[in-house]
Image (spheres, grey):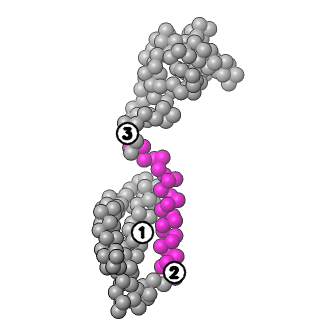
Amino acid sequence: MRPVVVVALAAGALIVTAPDVGTDAAALVGPDFPAAMLALLSLLLLGAAVWALLVSALASVPSLRGVAVVLTPRLLRGALFAGVTATVVVTPAHADGADHVLDGLRLPDRPVVSAAPVARPLTSSVVVVLPGDTLWGIAAEHLGARADAATIAGATRRWYATNRHVIGPDPDLIRPGQHLVPPQEDHS
């Protein structure tokens, strides 16, 4: 395949896959520092990709290869390498904040963060599990503020034993909406 065709294909791929420059520019001045850094690295990487495409286009024309060599000093190659490396390292480090990508997927190990706190219905016979609840937290709530860790641990085991048929085999995995019955000795 001719180099000019390869450069044209690369340019088309860059146009299709390039980040939204307007969104990244707006994120640079936003209050979220990780998003601003990611946007900055994204824009730097886009600039480096455009530069690499330009140099490749110039190098594919025999009479312009000298210009391509002038445009690729050692410092610029190092900056391109650093930008690509930083983007590859920083993006996965902040991927956890991108929960909106996973909307609709069931992730039982991640508590759902709601805008407003949800109040637990006040009943002594049934506890409705809310987003972010744990058996430890429910047991501690029912024992009161003066309960120590050993007492809460024992109560947690009793809560699980009483509600194993609802919770299932993993006591660390309770789901919002489940109805748990307090153990006999923990009734308030």
Q: How many marks?
A: 3
Quadrant for residue 52, please give it.
bottom left
Q: Residue at x 34, y 87 (%)?
A: 61
The numbered dot on residue 44 is 1
User: Looking at the image, can residue 80 be seen?
Assistant: yes
Query: Tag 1's secondary structure?
Result: helix
Dominant SS of magenta comes to: helix
State whether residue 155 is above or below residue 3: above
The location of residue 35, given as percent across then percent down, is 43, 55
The location of residue 127, given as percent across then percent down, is 48, 16
State whether residue 10 is above or below residue 63: above
Q: Residues within 10 Å of mark 1 (few under 14, many from 20)?
A: some
Tell me which segment is drawn in magenta. 74-100
Mark whose residue sits in front, 3 or 1: 3
Please indicate whether residue 41 sits to the left or right of residue 149 in the image: left
Q: CA distance from mark 3 to mark 2?
A: 42 Å
Query: Tag 2's secondary structure?
Result: helix
Residue located beneath label 2 in the image: 75
State whether residue 156 is above or below residue 131: above
User: Looking at the image, can residue 21 be seen?
Assistant: no
Q: Quadrant of the N terminus?
A: bottom left
Q: Nearer the viewer, residue 102 or 187?
A: 102
The numbered dot on residue 71 is none
Q: Amino acid at mark 2?
A: Leu
Please indicate whether residue 28 sits to the left or right of residue 184 in the image: left
Quadrant for residue 140, please give it.
top right
The location of residue 102, given as percent across then percent down, is 40, 42
The numbered dot on residue 103 is 3
Q: Residues within 10 Å of mark 3 (few under 14, many from 20)?
A: few
The location of residue 159, given as percent across then percent down, is 58, 16
Q: Amino acid at mark 3?
A: Asp
